[in-house]
Image (cartoon, rainbow, N blue to C red):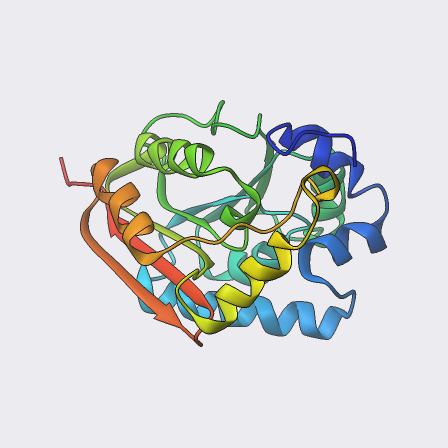
Amino acid sequence: MSELRGDYKSVWNSLSGSKEAAYLVVSGYTDENKFHADAEDTMEILGETVGIRPTDVFLEIGCGVGRVGRVLSPFVKEWIGCDVSNNMLRLAGRRLLGLPNTRLQEVSGYDLQPVADASVDVVYTTVVFMHLEEWDRYNYILEAMRVLKPGGRFYCDNVDLASEAGWAVFEESRRFMATARPSQISKCSTQPEIETFLKRAGFVDVKVAGRLNFWVYGWGQKPAA
């Protein structure tokens, strides 16, 4: 692939030219039942970390084809899906047909413009940080702080480098020749990285945990006014 890793819009538009291609690059499979089951699993994690309330406005960074939004939106006031790829958003729009409290927003890949300051209750991102450079992960955390209302909540996750399964992902990526690495190749995180990013961005009540000897996830709260 000729695109640079950091040229997220070009990379992800090129990977999502068809429904099948988009599904495969998002999840590795195209089975709708598994899509639904995995989205329910994400909802369970969000419920256990940041909570899900019927009065909440939720925003997802990197919503892809709307896998989570389809399942989550009936339980919240509004769900906003942000993605860098207009191809992904087109497919997400089809998946979200009939759900009037959903909204899709194309973004640059580096921020959440034009989402307004202090306008949402929860920002989350799942299975996205692995495709971003570390600086851009932190930029999105700063943007989450900006768009959250006082007291709003944030959640993120990535593959845990310190776990056995995470190390296997690292080794698999390392074996590519430098000139042959796919632009979307996975890069892991660590618990100290996630904790540092959240605290440096100004989040409080920060918590970081591992899951299934594979994932690290972190969450925190924007200080109340």
Q: Nearer the viewer, residue 63 or 133?
A: 133
The answer to whether any part of residue 53 appears in the image is no
Q: Residue at x 30, y 35 (%)?
A: 145
Using the rendered image of the protein, determine whether residue 208 is visible from the camera's viewpoint: yes
Q: Is residue 168 above or below residue 65?
A: below
- Say if 198 sits above or below 7 in the image: below
**In the rendering, at what x and y percent does residue 183 appear?**
68, 39
Query: Looking at the image, which residue is at 40% across and 72% down?
Result: 211
Position of residue 56 measured from the top left corner of the image (x, y, whole percent): 37, 50
Residue 19, percent from left and from top: 83, 51
Quarter of the rendering occupied by the C terminus: top left
Q: Residue 18 in the image: state x and y as whole percent.
A: 86, 46
Which residue is at a point 72% across and 37% down the rendered structure image? 179
Above or below — where is 138 with respect to 33? above
Q: How many marks?
A: 0
Query: Is 82 left, or right, of 93 in this rendering?
Result: left
Q: Is residue 38 left or right of residue 179?
A: left
